[in-house]
Each structure stands twice: as C-alpha cells, then as structure tokens.
Image: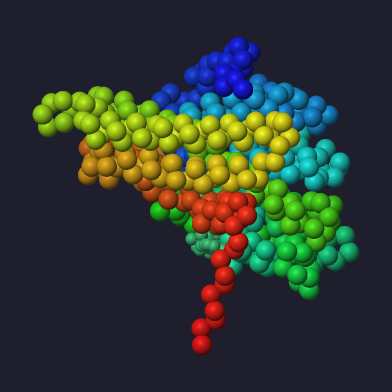
C-alpha cells in the first residue's frame, strides 16, 4: 500500500491549483461545502456558470466518462484530485448533482443509449445544471413511501404531486425524479425514475425555502399534470428501487467533499489563532486548551479523509462501496459539525457576528466590524447542522452500519393501547 500520489498525479494537482488561482475571483471565500447552495445567490451563480464553462474548456468535466459521449476516459484519481482541489478552495463549477456521483453516473449505469447520447455531452460541455428529486414531505428516511404519481398514458407519463428539499432545483435544467408508477405493488416496488427537464416542462412550479444559514437554495417542487415523454424513463418501469440504492450510495460519498472543504476552515482557524492575541497579549495558539482542540479536529479530519481514500480505492478496484460510503457520510457530518463547534468556542461571542448566508460580499464594514473571519464560523455552525441530515440522516446511516455488522434490528415499539 502506497499512500503517496504519483509524480504525474501531483503535477495534475499543481495544474488544478494554478487554474483556480487564475480563474477564481480574487479572495474567493467559498464557504459552502459543495458551493451548490450558495449558487442561490445570483452573483455566485454567475461565477458558477462561468467556472463550469472553463472546466469544460480544460476537458475536466466528465473526466472519467467514455470518449464516445464526449468524456475523456481519464483515471479516477484525476477526478478525485480535481474534486479535492476545487472543494478545498470552495470553487463552484463542478456540479455534484451531475459529476460527483450524481446523475452522470446513474445515466452511465442505467440510461438508454439515446439518453446517454442526449444528456452526457451537454453535461461535459458545461451547458446544464443538475438536481435530484427524491424527498417528499412524507418520504425522507422512509424513501420507499414516495407518492408523486406518474401515470403512463400512451407515450407520456403524467406526473402529479409534490417533492421537497430540492437543492438548487430552481437553477437546474435536468433531474432524476423518483415517482410512483404502480400504487398497487408493495412499497419498494412500483417506484420508477424519470428524467425531468425542469426549465422546459410546463406544469412545474417551485417555491423557495430559506435555510437557517440564510441560503435560499431549497425548493418545494409541485407537479400539476406534467407530461413527460416515456423515453425519459431511467431503467425499467417499477424497478426504480435499485437505482435509489445506487443513487444513495453515490450521494453518500459526497461526505468526502465535506471533509476536504472543512480542512480549509481548520487551516483558517489555525492561522487565526496564530495571529490573534489574548488579553495578556499572547497568541491564542499558545493556549493549551486551544492547541489541543485544534490538534483534535485535525486528527479527526485526517482519519475521516483516509476513510474517504479507502472509498475511492474501492471504487477504483471494483470493490463494494456501500458500507464505506455510509461510514464516510457519517464521518463527514460529525467532523464538520465538530470543527464548527470548536471554531465557535475559540472565537467566543465574536463568532456570532457577521452577515447571513456566509457571503462575504455582503459584509458591512461598520455593522460587521467585529466579525471574525468574515462571519465564517457562524455560517459554518448554522450550515453544518444539515450535514447529519442531507443524503440520509446519521441515525439511519448508523442503523445501516450496525446492520452491516450483523446486528439485529431494534424491535418495533408495541402499539399504544
Ligand atoms: C442540506 C440538504 C440538502 C438536501 N438536498 C436534497 C435534494 O437535493 N433532493 C432531495 O430529494 N432531498 C434533499 N434533501 C432531503 C434529505 O434527503 C432528507 O432530509 C433526509 O433524507 C431525511 O428525511 P426527512 O427530512 O424527511 O426526515 P425524517 O425521515 O422525517 O426524519 C426525522 C428524524 O427521524 C429520524 N429517523 C427517521 N427514521 C428513522 C429510523 N428508521 N431510525 C432512526 N431514526 C430515524 C431521523 O434520523 C431524523 O432525525 C436534503 C436535505 C438537506 C439537509
């Protein structure tokens, strides 16, 4: 086992860093782990679209995908290095809903030839944005309870119902939407996946929901007699559950991105402690408690990151990723929350100051005068709460991890008399 990257891989990392230095706006803050919720800000959306085009021009979108769809058939490690560098810098442009275990991989695995030929080249050229349409008001952890109805009538599916928590759906062009095609079959059967072109399809309305961090990226999506051609069915009808499982496993590996992104916050926090003096005029970094806390979060992040590498190694060698993806998802959530807590403790009351939304461009020089690191820790504290919920909650993921150890399920509580 060799933990080092090869000289060729290191050279690629350098190239990505130089590209980001050149192409990202100066002092880019990049506060959101996947830079996707921040896409809700018009200004960040513009940067995101521009970066997507620049990545496409470099040949860095669809890096590992087959050449026949416009991909570049490069080794997975290159994709991982690209993700790491972009995520560390908080750079938008590498839309996770298409490229980081998102729609693209589902299309490659389950799509028809016509679907691949239509959509993959658009993604690779950086022309579209993606989303994912799973959750409903009564189908989150219990995803098999999906109720959004899709009736096959002639050549079209007719969709009626509602989705919720759809990240940046208002920006998206295309999403796999999880629907019920047969209400008479058992819950896990009767589910299908349909590719929906949000912007071009009449009958879809969206309502934005603001998160506690101030980002307005969530959407409720309503379907009112929405007509979708039957060619947009992904996989076979009523066999969507296996795609659900594949999608969740891909999505959980997103924990790796959280873990890379949080390293930047740790590094900024370390710099802050070196530069900031306490009441006795000594740098905070000399304080034993603070030093221990910083060391603790670095160790936690390093351990979690290495489990992320194990996940990538399994993916590369054709191993079973399900269990490790689940571990990474759990580690990503709790590690990022811990860093935010430590940051808040170190900065004390100052940590509560700063603009909402974590968008440094909104910083008011008078009002936010005393905010530290532009209010970054406050934003992190509020925005990481959802990291133990997104892509399936930590409680449910822990249940699955226990199941993988062969532990029996908890008995259901007896019904109340
Ligand atoms: C930042 C973020 C982005 C998201 N983006 C999207 C998106 O783009 N598209 C999309 O479709 N969805 C998205 N979601 C929704 C997400 O997938 C759901 O929130 C998640 O699956 C949990 O479902 P729920 O919110 O309905 O909670 P519930 O399932 O109602 O759970 C409520 C509580 O009960 C606990 N619980 C439930 N069942 C069990 C059990 N069996 N054992 C133990 N505890 C249990 C849960 O852990 C949780 O604490 C996003 C969520 C977040 C936070």
Can you give x and y, in whole percent of width and height, for residue 380 in the image?
Answer: 39, 42
Task: Report whether residue 211 is seen.
Answer: yes
Can you give x and y, in whole percent of width and height, for residue 223 in the image?
Answer: 67, 63
Task: From the viewer's perspective, tell me whether residue 344 is left or right of residue 214.
Answer: left
**Quarter where residue 240 is shown:** bottom right
Along the viewing direction, whichever of 135 and 323 lies nearer the viewer = 323
Residue at 72 percent of width and 31 percent of height: 317
Along the viewing direction, whichever of 2 and 37 lies nearer the viewer = 2
Task: Report whether residue 136 is seen.
Answer: no
Residue at 53 percent of width and 31 percent of height: 306
Q: Residue furthest right?
A: 154
**Quarter where residue 1 is shown:** top right
Q: Is residue 161 above or below residue 170?
A: below
Residue at 34 percent of width and 31 percent of height: 295
Figure quadrant, ligand 1 = bottom right
Q: Residue furthest bottom?
A: 417
Q: Is residue 46 above or below residue 169?
A: above
Can you give x and y, in whole percent of width and height, for residue 189 in the image?
Answer: 77, 64
């Amino acid at each position: 086992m060799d933990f080092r990257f090869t000289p060729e891989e290191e050279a690629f990392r350098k190239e990505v860093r130089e590209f980001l230095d050149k192409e990202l706006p100066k002092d880019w803050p990049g506060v959101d782990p996947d830079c996707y919720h921040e896409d809700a800000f018009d200004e960040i959306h513009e940067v995101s679209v521009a970066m997507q085009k620049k990545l496409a021009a470099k040949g860095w979108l669809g890096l590992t995908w087959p050449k026949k769809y416009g991909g570049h058939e490069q080794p997975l490690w290159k994709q991982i290095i690209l993700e790491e560098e972009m995520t560390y810098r908080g750079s938008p442009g590498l839309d996770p809903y298409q490229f980081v275990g998102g729609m693209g991989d589902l299309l490659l695995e389950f799509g028809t030839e016509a679907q691949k030929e239509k959509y993959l080249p658009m993604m690779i050229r950086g022309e579209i944005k993606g989303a994912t349409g799973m959750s409903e008001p009564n189908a989150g952890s219990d995803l098999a309870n999906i109720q959004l109805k899709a009736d096959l009538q002639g050549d079209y599916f007719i969709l009626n119902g509602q989705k919720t928590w759809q990240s940046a759906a208002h920006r998206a062009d295309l999403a796999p939407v999880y629907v019920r095609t047969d209400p008479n079959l058992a819950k896990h059967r009767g589910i299908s996946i349909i590719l929906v072109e949000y912007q071009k399809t009449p009958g879809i309305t969206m309502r934005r929901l603001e998160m506690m961090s101030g980002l307005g990226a969530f959407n409720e999506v309503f379907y009112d007699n929405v007509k979708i051609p039957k060619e947009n069915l992904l996989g076979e009808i009523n066999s969507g559950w296996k795609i659900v499982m594949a999608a969740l496993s891909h999505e959980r590996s997103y924990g790796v991105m959280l873990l890379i992104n949080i390293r930047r916050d740790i590094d900024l926090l370390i710099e802050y402690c070196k530069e900031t003096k306490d009441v006795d005029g000594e740098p905070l970094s000399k304080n034993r408690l603070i030093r221990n806390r910083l060391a603790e979060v670095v160790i936690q992040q390093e351990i979690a990151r290495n489990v992320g590498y194990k996940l990538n190694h399994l993916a590369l060698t054709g191993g079973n990723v399900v269990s490790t993806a689940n571990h990474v998802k759990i580690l990503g959530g709790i590690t990022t929350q811990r860093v935010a807590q430590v940051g808040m403790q170190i900065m004390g009351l100052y940590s509560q100051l700063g603009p909402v939304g974590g968008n440094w461009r909104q910083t008011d020089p008078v009002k936010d005068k005393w905010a530290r690191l532009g209010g970054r820790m406050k934003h992190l504290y509020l925005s990481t709460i959802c990291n133990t919920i997104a892509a399936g909650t930590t409680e449910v993921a822990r249940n699955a991890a226990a199941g993988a150890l062969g532990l029996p399920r908890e008995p259901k509580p007896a019904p109340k008399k």
